[in-house]
Image (cartoon, rainbow, N blue to C red):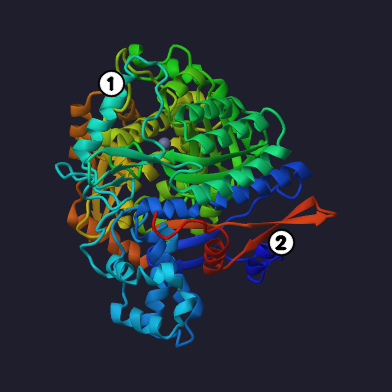
Amino acid sequence: MSMMLWTLAACSDAAQGDKPWIVDRFDDVKVIRYEVPGFETLPREQKELIYYLAQAAKCGRDILFDQNCPANLAVRRMLETVYENYAGDRTTPEWRALEKYLKKVWFANGIHHHYSNDKFIPEFTEEYLLTVIETIPEEKFGAELNALRGEVCVAIFDPAAYPTRLNQRAGDDLLLTSSSNYYKGVSQAEAERYYAAQAAADAGNPEPVSYGLNSQLAKDPKTGRLYERVWKVGGMYSPAIERIVYWLEKAQAVAAEPQKTTIASLIEYYRTGDLKKFDEYNIRWVKDTLSNVDFVNGFIEDYGDPLGRKASWEANVNFMDSAACRRTEIISENAQWFEDHSPVAPEYKKKKVKGVSAKVITVALLGGDCYPATPIGINLPNADWIRKEYGSKSVTIDNITYAYDMAAHGNGFNEEFVLRAEDRDRMDRYGKLADDLHTDLHECLGHGSGQLAPGVAGGELKSYGSTLEETRADLFGLYYLGDPKLVELGLVPSFDVARAGYAKYILNGMMTQLARIEPGKNVEEAHMRNRKLICEWCYERGKADGVIEWVERDGKRYVAVNDFEKLRALFGEMLREIQRIKSEGDYEAGRALVEKYAVSVDPELHAEVRERYAALGIEPYGGFLNPEYEPVERDGEIVDVKIHYPTDYAAQMMDYSKNYSYLPLKN
Ligand code: ZN
């Protein structure tokens, strides 16, 4: 296995316990390592399966880079070639700036910030880059890259080129002003007409496919005709998809039923690009709640497309954390009770909540849009009709939240931002439990709850859809976090867990999440918008009663919750309204709420939060370094798989770029 050797130099097999959790920090980012407890004691076949799935999870990384911006692969290759071959002084400020920029590109899977979507501003000059390039023999770059040198410089240094990955400013042509690669020369109106025609042709079909999910929509410059370049074997991104399929076939060979058939069905989809096959795969996948090892590999989430249609490539390989699963089992077993007792209007409740499966998992590998920054919960599939008919699979990722928690310990955050000692004490005691339960409720019940009114297809909320959907799921979680039922079920000792969770949520939504936003910018990302929407709405509604209060002390502002019971009632009221908006597809009401509460930022508060946050030296974003898996072979058979924990972020990125890079620089 020669391809493993390159990274092993940076690996250590020593016990991890005393090593720092944060392995690299740059700009606004920290890179954290995570452990995979329980891997060593898995049966051999499951280790082998994880190894193959992990390989498949690494093979689509280039796809995501190209989806995020058509210049990304060339920029990355150029900087990596420089990084690997430059023999000059690596201690100068300009070199360090170049290295930092490359680390940011790796982290964001491209030249735009992974959260704000803004293009990175290099802190080194074009002249410096060109001088460095001149010192390196031309053949190191290769003909393909040399031909793109000018384009790379424009992409990095010209602020007018590819200014934002995802523009959501109402009134703009969201496609022509976004730098992602999901549409090529196609205006928003043209794309909307194109897909409206597909939907119209399929009207009344209770099982509509997710049109446009796995393709680039392009326009023939001569004829003006629109056509889809499908991401499949033989289509766009074929070289990477072929490698994914290669490893999935190996996984299929060692998997047991029903997983074997599920993997076969995913392979068929990758081969044909047929979205009907993707739905078949999803149905098989969602029904399989028993396989210990599980995975996601494909075009899944549509947050990167301003029209919410095209999906970015992502991967995640995991196995069940059975000890921690008891918590979510209890929630899942009571799903119908929660649905029946929710404050939502009766006609918009699900009569029968189906197939809510709840698991806590241990992640073994992150890939694509889940790497290095990753969600801490998964709720799939996304197609509304499959969720309604077959339910959804929800998991929370315990080893990742654990690593976050360890990395954050003792960083001074609570002392700086939490006014009252009793809130700090409750957060110390119950903060992690409150977070875990909120995530469970959000993922296991929130997204799966409620139903649409007859004739409403989903998708009516357009660019506000993701924010409102996350709002709905968060409110479901918040409302039930404070329900006496949780005490009755033995999930929490008292309402104090909700007090801890609420105080933390309000603080984050109204204040501290602003630390992640650049000065002068608005709130853009769906989850951040949803948190701000909830907090500001509740603040305004509860103002007369002083439910949430701004307090000024020693020139610093604090936000405190005075009445947790009333706050919970407000969460319930808001949940009812947000569910109505989704159920009725009330675009106008949804738009009005988001635009009023979730978008704009008070510049003074923003500046204060950023200053106080910066003084703590905490990076607002975190991402993760993957472990490495090394098969042990005897007589051509895999007899074991060893796990290693590297600690060098740049080395892992270079390894992935060298050994898992299959696409041409322009696609
Ligand atoms: Zn969610």
> Mark 1 or 2 closer to N-term?
2
Is the CB atom of the residue marked by disc 1 within 8 angstroms of ligand 1's nearest atom? Answer: no
Does residue 437 lie above or below 317 as drawn?
above
- Residue under the point 70% across and 29% down: 257
* Left or right for 112, reference 397: left
Q: Nearer the viewer, residue 595 or 224?
A: 224
Quarter of the picture holding the N terminus: bottom right
Q: For residue 28, what is the image quadrant?
A: bottom left
Which residue is at the front of the view, 442 or 648? 648
Q: Residue at x 45, y 83 (%)?
A: 136
Q: How crowded is the residue under tag 1: few (<14 C-alpha within 10 Å), some, or many (20+)? A: few
Q: Position of residue 405 (x, y in %)?
A: 52, 53
Q: Is residue 481 above or below residue 131?
A: above
Q: Tell me: 60 left or right of 115.
A: right
Cβ of mark 2 under 8 Å from ligand 1: the answer is no
Q: Splitting the image into 4 quarters, where does residue 329 fall?
A: top right
Secondary structure beneath dot 1 equals helix
The image shows residue 464 at horizontal and vertical percentages of 26, 35
Amino acid type at circle 2 is: Met
Residue 562 can be seen, yes or no: no
The residues tagged by marks 1 and 2 sit, at their Cα atoms, a distance apart of 52 Å
**Between residues 461 and 256, which one lies in front from this camera angle?**
256
Residue type pointed to by label 1 = Ala
Can you see residue 492?
Answer: yes
Using the image, tell me which numbered label, if any, was put on residue 200: 1
- The numbered mark at residue 1 is 2
